[in-house]
Every structure is written in structure tokens, then in C-alpha cells.
Amino acid sequence: MECVGARDAMIQYEGDVYRPPSEASSLIVQAAIGCAHNDCTFCSMFKGKRFRVRAEDEVIRDFRAARAAYREVRRIFLADGDVLALSNERLLRLLGEIGELFPECERVSFYGSPQDVLRKTPEELAALREHGAGFVYLGAESGSGRVLENVRKGATRNEIIAAIKKIEAAGLISSVTFISGLGGRELSEEHAIETGRLISEAEPSYASLLTLLLDPAAPMYEDVRAGRFSFLPPREIAAETLLMLEHTEIEKDCVFRSNHASNYISLKGTLPRDKARMMDELRAALKAGGFKDERFRLL
């Protein structure tokens, strides 16, 4: 699908565009199509795509089309959901092209699964940083081993922690996402406590919360329709988030966000400095209400 025009070329994009909220102003170019794992039950983003790596010349052609179309490109996000699965040799060539075509570019970012990160050597990750890579967005989803197994994440709690630490040790920035309500009512307490403990142990630079909101195409939606899984209401989501923060003890600065369109209440701060203030905001919401109306929540 053509999505960006230049006088003599078009940037090609296959399927719907998915990117982290913080990449809203970035140039988005697909280096790969889909997700190599693509088995998470809560996710429908790439279910209609079979994972494949795009031809290198196609990606470079898109870079050149963007250079012709845009005067300034400060940030680039390489899509789709599993770009870190590419070989380091290919990634370094793409980063080299970006460096030549966009000398003003301040950072290049991409999604990376825990499995992708752990397959890379420390030297390979450091080389990516040296050639312009910045953020690695990693979906951890939960700190609970049972929740991770239930949603078919494909990575264990210990593997997720190891991957985050490996990203940070290489000088890259890890931005890690968790999903409120993913354990349902049965595993809500465990999900909250173990997620807080995972953040404490892994020490990511950024941690963010989404709140579970399913597309009907997500496999987990069948469990909802069959009554095997129930969404948590706003008050229980807030209580779960409060419990998670109570069990988050981190010394390194960690930017924390719960301001995605799916969230019932918006939180912004830096841990550990703003932990008490954010917990007070949650307690106030539990006492007075004021949660986002369901009609205004979006994926």
C-alpha cells in the first residue's frame, strides 16, 4: 500500500501501521513485514501477515523516497514488529544508509522481542548503538510466569529480565510495555506484584502500561465470549496498578507512563522520585472515581 508520496517515488507500506506512541512524529519504514513470533493471544496486530524480511533494495528505495519528500527527519522507526530478528549485517547496512541519507537523524528505533535480544551478542547490540540505533521497544506484558504462559508470550520471566538488562548494558535504551488486566481477576494480584518486581530487577529506562483492550481478531477474544476470561473494571485496574507500584523498588531513574489511549487513568512520572505522588493519584481516583469512559478507550 502506498502511503507517502514524493515527486518520483512512493514509500511502500504493507498493511496497517503499528508503532509506539512516542514514535508518532517519526519516519516509519518497514524493514520486515509482520512478527516472527505472532502467537500472543491478546494481539491481533500482525495476524494477517506472514513474517518476512523485506528485500534490502526495497527498504533503501523507501529511504530515498522519504529523503526526497521530507526536508528534515529527526527520528526513524523501523517497522514491523520484529526488526531485531534481522541479521546484524543487514541492520548495520540499513543504519549506514540512514546515516548517509539523513545526517540530521538523532535516533533509529524498532521493536525487539526478548528472543531477538537474547540471540544477539553484546558486541552486536553495541554495534547497533554505535551506528545510530537508540530505543528498543520490548513488550514484556507481565512479570508473572503464569500470565506469560497463558497468553503464549514465547518468553519466560527470566528471559525478559535478561533481555532488558542486555539492551541496557549495550548502551541502548529499553522501553518496556506491560498490560494492565492481562491476568484477569484470577491472576490480577500475582500479575501486579510480579510485574512490579520485574521492573525492579530489570531496571528498564522506560516502563509503560497499556490496559487490556481486545480486537475481535485476537485469539483471546474467544475466551471472553466463552466466559473463560473477564475484563477488569476501571476500579480494579487502578487497584492493580497501585499494587504494582507498591512492589516496584528501583534505584535507577525509570520514566513511567500510563497515558496510552487504552488506559482508564493517566499517570506520568519518573521512578522512584514520583512513585508516592502517582500512588496518591491512584488512591484519589479509587476514592472519587473519574475514570475514562469506555467509549473513549482506543487500541
Image (cartoon, rainbow, N blue to C red):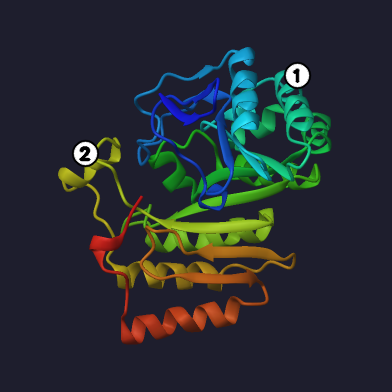
Q: Which residue is mark 2?
A: 222
Q: Can residue 143 be seen in the rendering of this structure?
A: no
Find residue 180 and report its horizontal and vertical position in percent: 41, 58
Q: Are marks 1 and 2 in contact (CB under 8 Å)?
A: no
Figure quadrant of the N terminus = top left
Circle 2 sits in a helix, a strand or a loop, which is it?
A: helix
Disc number for residue 250: none
Which picture quadrant has residue 273? Answer: bottom right
Q: Which residue is mark 1?
A: 89
* Image height of 289 relative to 78, above or below: below
Chain-order first, disc 1 or disc 2 = 1
Q: Is residue 69 left or right of residue 147?
A: right
Q: Is residue 278 left or right of residue 227?
A: right
Find residue 135 and report its horizontal and vertical position in percent: 67, 45
Amino acid type of the residue tagged 2 in the rendering: Glu
In three-dimensional space, the C-alpha distance between marks 1 and 2, rounded to whole angstroms, equals: 41 Å
Residue at far left of view: 226
Q: Can residue 168 be seen in the rendering of this structure?
A: yes
Foreground pick, 239 / 74: 74
Q: Is residue 40 left or right of residue 222?
A: right
Which picture quadrant has residue 138? Answer: top right
| Residue drawn at (35%, 37%) of the image | 41
Find residue 27 and report its horizontal and vertical position in percent: 58, 39
| Residue drawn at (58%, 81%) of the image | 276
* Image height of 28 relative to 298, above or below: above
| Residue drawn at (44%, 56%) of the image | 210
* Image height of 255 relative to 227, above or below: below
| Residue drawn at (56%, 52%) of the image | 22
Amino acid type of the residue tagged 1 in the rendering: Glu
